[in-house]
Amino acid sequence: MYCGVDVGLKKCHAAVIGDGVEFLGDYEELDLSGVKLVGIDAPLSFPERGAFRECERLLLKMGIRLFPSGAPFFRKISL
């Protein structure tokens, strides 16, 4: 099973996927037993300048939409 965590300012949400959706809800209620891999949706670093890191610029060039990690609201919920 795999888990994705969406970090929020007021709440964190999670989804666990196995053969189907095993869990979808508040991270506080999550049981991680049986989960092999967890992905956390929150920037661990900020751009040195501007709004985007190099990896985000590459994703944008591929047509993948995202929120810029340099946005002020990310600074409140990140490291």
Image (cartoon, rainbow, N blue to C red):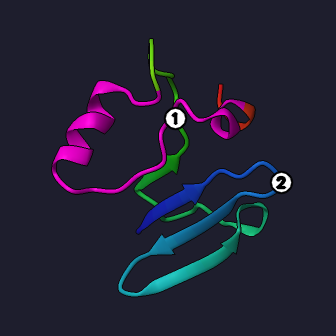
Question: Residue 33, located in which quarter of the rendered image?
Answer: bottom right
Number of other residues with Cα within 10 Å of mark 1, as a class: few under 14, some 14 to 19, many 20 or more: some
Residue 48, percent across and down? Answer: 45, 12
* Residue at 47%, 84% in the rendered image: 21
* Residue at 35%, 56% in the rendered image: 65
Question: Residue 55, located in which quarter of the rendered image?
Answer: top left
Counting every numbered tag in the picture gives 2
Q: Secondary structure at mark 2?
A: loop
Residue 61, percent across and down? Answer: 18, 45
The magenta segment is 51-75
Q: Residue furthest left?
A: 62
Of label 2 and label 1, which has the lower sequence position? 2
Q: Hey, what amino acid is under mark 2?
A: Lys
Question: Residue 53, located in which quarter of the rendered image?
Answer: top left
Q: Is residue 50 above or below residue 1?
A: above
Task: Kindly identify which numbered label has been placed on residue 52.
Answer: none
Residue closest to the eye, 64 or 50: 50
- Please give the residue where the numbered disc 1 appears in the rendered image: 43
Q: Secondary structure at mark 1?
A: loop
Q: Hey, what amino acid is under mark 1?
A: Pro
Task: Kindly identify which numbered label has been placed on residue 10.
Answer: 2
Q: Is residue 17 above or below residue 12?
A: below
- Is-magenta flag for residue 8? no
Residue 4, percent across and down? Answer: 50, 60
The residues bearing labels 2 and 1 have C-alpha atoms spaced at a distance of: 17 Å
Q: Is residue 66 above or below residue 50?
A: below
